[in-house]
Amino acid sequence: MPKRPNTIALRLGLGAVLGSLAQLSALGLLAVSAYLISRAWEQPPILYLMVAITSVRAFGIGRGVLRYAERLVSHDAAFRGLERLRVAVWRKLVRLAPAGLPVWRSGDLQARLVDDVDGTGDRWLRGALPLAAAVITAAAAVVIQAAILPAAGAILAAALLAAALAGPALASWSARYALRATAAERGDLTENVRACLHGREELVAAGTDAVALERALAGDERLRRAHARIAWSAGLGQAAGLLAMAAAVTGALWTGIPAVAAGTLDGVLLACLALVPLAAFEPVLALPAAAQQTAAAKESGRRLVEITRESEPRPDPDEPMDFEPNPLGGPPFIEIKRLSVTWPGADRPALEGFDLKIQPGERVAVMGPSGSGKSTLAAALMGFLPYEGSLRFGGVELAEYDGDDVRRTVGLCSQDAHVFDTTLAENLRLARTSATDDELVRALRWAGLRDWFDGLELGLQTPLGEHGRAVSGGERGRIALARCLLADREVLVLDEFDAHLDAATAERVLRTAAAALEGKTAVIITHRPLPDGVVDRTVHLRPPVPAPRDAPLSSLLDLAQRG
């Protein structure tokens, strides 16, 4: 099968060609304009100037058209690449959730997903493409200058080489520490601002709002100083380029004027010698900023590579089995034997030696005190965590299946399910984008929100606010339950959805949701007993017993003295 061409690379290549042609048009415009003005001063017949006049028009129009086309093509390629990269990073984060994400703070993750992904696009738009245009334009300018006067061409080549090497080197050298610190400081600032905004009520109540605000302002000041250092460095590189350009113009006049006086150079071409370096240095002067953008993009790429290289808590098998736990359709038979699950970084299992068999369509309540492993069991059933022992769906170990296939059959309603800052309808359609309004309303009634929904003036278009601040904790949990029911999975894991509900409301919600749970397997994790008729049976979890450890001698002596 022939390999498909990389359309993004082709578009970037086309953008580089168009950008180079735009710069060459600028070079031709300045050179021909200088010749036209000088030649017109001699007042020749107008026909002698028609070629130059037409060329000026062509170069002037071509410069604008080519520049617009280059921006259109190159930005289109960059946005396509950013789309692929952002989706790839997002999918990796999904594979790491929830056990693998605590390695990073939420603000830092947000900075990586947004700022660092955007920063990688600058490596091409403001790094590679300007470099290609500068090289091609500089080479053409040297050829033109050498054709007019070889000595001036040599001076221009030396000045361009010095500017192309010294400017980016100075900019990168003086800003290397600032560039390295910027990405980390940006993540810290995002985290501090997020903490101030999301926890503002708690901070004010505890009297620590001033401390949190001062921390955010200090981070902003550090980021500002880093950006100022980068801007100062870019100016230093720009100054080196301007000095080289002044040297090239001076050298052209220094060699050109004696040549005109000696009669070896037509005086009309002297203006071309002086103005060609100006056009040649236009793309070269952008190289210091391009070098900095490239360095910043590399740092952003390094931070993204840290995510992609992070090992998944529960890696998928190399050759996963086709997920068909129940060939007859409907929910599968679930069999759990001696199940032990340990969270990444923990020194002992959160769930140990657990046994359970769940028949298709059975509703089982799982109870236990905090720390007994209820949420760990939910994460294991969702395929988020590795396990020891046996966890079989339809007689096949869950570890043999692809995690995404598992989650297409098993749905989770978590006690901390996120509610987005958008409308009620959009929050529900996260489960099924094709759901109609009638299906959304039915899901809300299944979740026991009929009276609440009937009292909404805007109905499904009601905004829920940031993190669902417009609704109570109980309503937020039932909205998450409605979203889970709307997804229509064969197996539903309800992880303490009733954490903010009283016992009577929780029982009423489960009885209301019985129609949606009909024919499905439901594992209902709760902290309170559920009455008969709501679940088929109840299973109790006990916290795992920590393994005994050898106490240090100092601790034994201390205990002896206290005894």
Image (tube, rainbow, N blue to C red):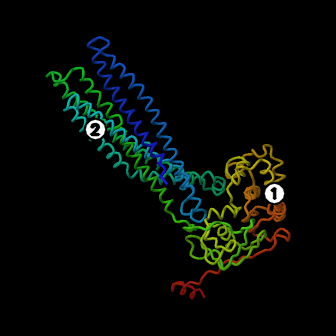
Secondary element at tag 1: helix
- Which sits earlier in the primary sequence, circle 1 or circle 2? 2
The residue nearer to you, when weighing 478 against 124, is: 124
Using the image, determine if residue 401 lies above or below residue 44: below
Q: Which residue is mark 2?
A: 160
Image-quadrant location for residue 445: bottom right
Q: Which mark is residue 446?
A: 1
Residue found 47% across the figure and 58% down from its top: 305
Amino acid type shown at disc 1:
Trp
Q: Looking at the picture, how far across and down is residue 472, in whole percent?
A: 75, 54
For this view, does 87 lie left or right of residue 35?
Answer: right
Residue found 55% across the figure and 65% down from its top: 312
Q: Residues within 10 Å of mark 1 (few under 14, many from 20)?
A: many
Badge count: 2
Q: Looking at the picture, how far across and down is residue 499, in whole percent?
A: 74, 64
If the image is split into quadrants, where does the C terminus sit? bottom right
The residue nearer to you, when weighing 341 against 486, is: 486
Image-quadrant location for residue 252: top left
Secondary element at tag 2: helix
Q: Residues within 10 Å of mark 2 (few under 14, many from 20)?
A: many
Q: Residue at the left extreme? A: 262
Residue found 73% across the figure and 72% down from its top: 333
Q: Residue at the front extreme? A: 1
Using the image, determine if residue 543 lies above or below residue 247: below
Amino acid type shown at disc 2:
Leu
